[in-house]
Image: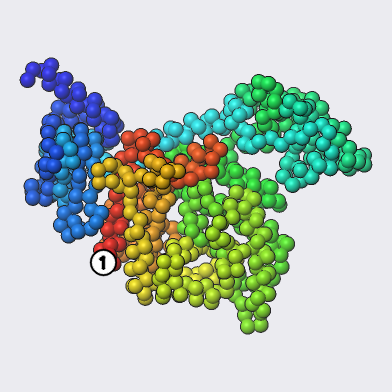
Amino acid sequence: MSNSATEMLVSASIEFLQAYPPFDRMERGALEFLGEHVRLAYYPKDSVILSTATGVARTLHILQRGKVMARQTGDVSMLEFSSMTLGPGECFPIGSVMAQRPSTNAYTALEDVFCYELPADDCFSLLQMSTAFNLFCTQYIASLLSQSRQQLQSQFSQRVAEQQTMNSPLASIIKKEPVAVTRDTTIRKVVEVMAAGRIGSMIIVDGEQQPVGIFTLSDVLKRIVLPGTSLDNPIHSVMSPGPHTLPLAANAYDAALAMAMHGVRHVLAVDEGGRLKGVVSERDLFALQRVGLRQIRQSIDTATTIDMLLQASHDVRQLSLNMLAQGVGAEQITQFISALNDTLTRRIIQLNLDRHDLFGIDWAWLSFGSEGRDEQTFSTDQDNGIVYICTDIMDREHTQLRLLEFARDVNADLDRCGFPLCTGKIMASNPELCLTLEEWEEKFDYWVRTPEPKALLNATIFFDFRPLFGKFNLADRMRLSLLRQTKGNPLFLRMLAGNALSVLPPLGKIRDFVTDTDPQHPGTIDLKRYGARLFIDAARIFAMAHDVAATNTVQRLKLAAAVMNISPEEAAAAVDAFNFIQLMRLRHQHSEQVQGREGDNLIRPDELNEVERRILKEAFRQARKLQQRLKLDYQL
């Protein structure tokens, strides 16, 4: 072959490889070495490319075209989910080539396949000259995760920069529809609406929805109370006429300048026809500035009203976005959100304790579910309860009634601060979840001894509990009792494992992913149900079986692995996979909420880039490995 033809083939190989990790980040010299040493091989449909029978793996395959089925062999081949599909850009068998051993998988061409093949000796040479390739081979999923984080960081940094500078357009600052009334509306009606909706300003508009005046809370005292103005008068008699307006296309700097020049605290945004579209306040402009952890924590600790805590909850979300932009991992972000939400909840409890007499009662506020695991995302409702002590001299019914009245107010205030009431009534204001220590122990004992479907479902929610306020020792006693009950009941753990295996990773045998067939959500994957839950369920069972008191999924996996003969590398891969799925959930929920929709967990694989698709597939494979261990451990 002529030199020019060889150069063309090498160039074509490099061009293909550069589209996939880790080759897209490989050093130029190493990439040229790879392009010069690979050869393109063809395998017809249904042919075996590699198997255990072929002996020690002597070649690294890089799939160029087509799809390959990788099926586990040996003892684990009897498992129903023991295969996976590889697509263009994926390498195999990395572990076998590195260890110079036979492959544990059989690789079969699902269709006509072309592979770039690199001899093992050249593969080891490439490891020496390329840091990117070395990292990829030794820390496969961690390497992909690092690339994905950098992409997320770039994407969110741009969004944060747009949202958090004084160049932000007014349209991006306005978060809710303006509330307006006509000139002839009575003062009484306006004040009632402002009080009911906790609105700081009311806009007065004409018949064309063009603003003609503004009335604020500060006007109540000087224009109504002190002069003794009748509440039956029309609002135009006490409004400030000629409010300052700006077009929607104006930015935050324009609004700040208008406020400074005219000594006002509100600027109205209008469309091209002069119609009211929103209100921008001093507070909105202040919120554009970067919010720090210390400021948020201080604002929560010193808050004297629920409205002040509501603003703090918005600041928590904004700071979480900043952390995404800075490339902080999902484990840290979810723990950060949970920690500040804990602080918010405790402050709400403290404010309500001023209005409720709970003196003489030993009690603790419990969190369940994602909050109990320190794994809250942007979209989360309430999951809480109360445990208390009822001595012989106390009236149990009266004591519970006092706690329930208190819990109802706390639940309502949490709802106001952005934590929706639980539709399943998993809240402390539910009498079934405001129980004595003995009643909680009896409830847990019953679920463990009679592991029917409802009991197993309850276990997945309530066994992940954590105290937030009050007598923490009550929760510690609950945990010790629960671990004694579960460790001594292998049947319960086996049933719980069976329940965990009822949901499989959404990996297809032919397609990369199995997506939802629901007409309302076609082509999507629920990352909570079919992603995070798989790791959470497995980690919970490992923890219960091995006396691990932690409730956090990552901690459970790490601590249980140490006593289950799971290698640190295998445990790290599972943790990285779980964290990536959590990161995808955070990103998607934020994106949904920015567009005015309620954040959910439904992602579309077709909209992911190549790196994200690859690592999501690998994350699901790690979930499948955990499920395989459950299946083997409990003979399911």
Q: From this viewpoint, which residue is outermost toward the bottom?
A: 392
Residue carrying label 1: 635
> Residue 610: image x %, image y %?
32, 35
Which amino acid, by three-letter code, is at mark 1? Gln
Nearer-the-camera pick, 636 or 556: 636
Image coordinates of residue 16 in percent, x first then y, are 23, 28
- Does 314 sit above or below residue 468? above
| Circle 1 crowding by C-alpha within 10 Å: few under 14, some 14–19, many from 20 | few
Quick check: 13 left or right of 558?
A: left
State left or right for residue 607 relative to residue 431.
left
Front one among 234 and 130: 234
Tally the numbered discs.
1
Report x, y in % for residue 69: 20, 44
Identify whether 455 is placed above or below 241: below
Position in image of residue 269 (x %, y %): 68, 27
Question: Is residue 3 at least partly visible in the picture?
Answer: yes
Indicate whether 153 appears above or below 197. above
- Find residue 565 and report its image quarter: bottom left
